[in-house]
Amino acid sequence: MNGNVHLACSDRRVARVLRYLTDDLTRRPTLSDVSRVAGLETTYFSKLFRAIIGIPYAEWSRRTRVGHARQLLETADLSITAIAAAVGYMDVTTFERAFRRVEGTSPRECRRLLQRDRNSNPRNADFMARNGETPVRHEGRAADSGEALAAT
């Protein structure tokens, strides 16, 4: 996961939490847990996180995990179950539900679309893989442009 995501955060307490969360996505800390990491009361941390990041903690966590799972679907030869576990979902059904909520499609369909796009434009896909980039999604499928997926 991108360990530099915390650098854009102006509040050191929230930056500490972002670093803690992105260092190991298999951890599934509660809001109370991350509030303790920040050294703040839970309600105050929740409001601060939302004010700084722009979305609630649970939504940020879901988007971050699904974004990393999408990268793994494209770049790693792992089963859906293994990818779910790698991003902190021990239950595949819960992972698939979260993935569909963020991406608008199932992990299997996403992988199929990514492979189709990669096969239809292997030169671009190889270039992007070498440069650590991920195609941007537009209307349910990956774009053929060289744009990188923006961190959410």
Image (cartoon, rainbow, N blue to C red):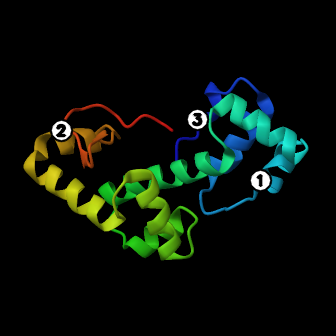
Q: Amino acid at mark 3?
A: Val
Residue density around tag 2, few if under 14, some if 14–19, many if 20 or more, within 10 Å: some
Residue at 42% in and 34% down: 150
Q: Of the residues under marks 1 and 3, which one precedes in the sequence?
A: 3
Identify the residue under disc 1.
31
Label 1 SS: helix
Tell me where residue 99 sits by quadrant: bottom left
Label 3 SS: helix
Q: Nearer the viewer, mark 2 or mark 3?
A: 2
Q: Which mark is residue 5?
A: 3
Identify the residue under disc 2.
144
Q: Amino acid at mark 2?
A: Asp
Q: Position of residue 113 (x, y in %)?
A: 21, 56
Query: For the residues marked 2 and 1, what is the alpha-carbon distance in whole angstroms?
Result: 38 Å
Q: Are marks 1 and 3 in contact (CB under 8 Å)?
A: no
Residue at 69% in and 29% down: 52
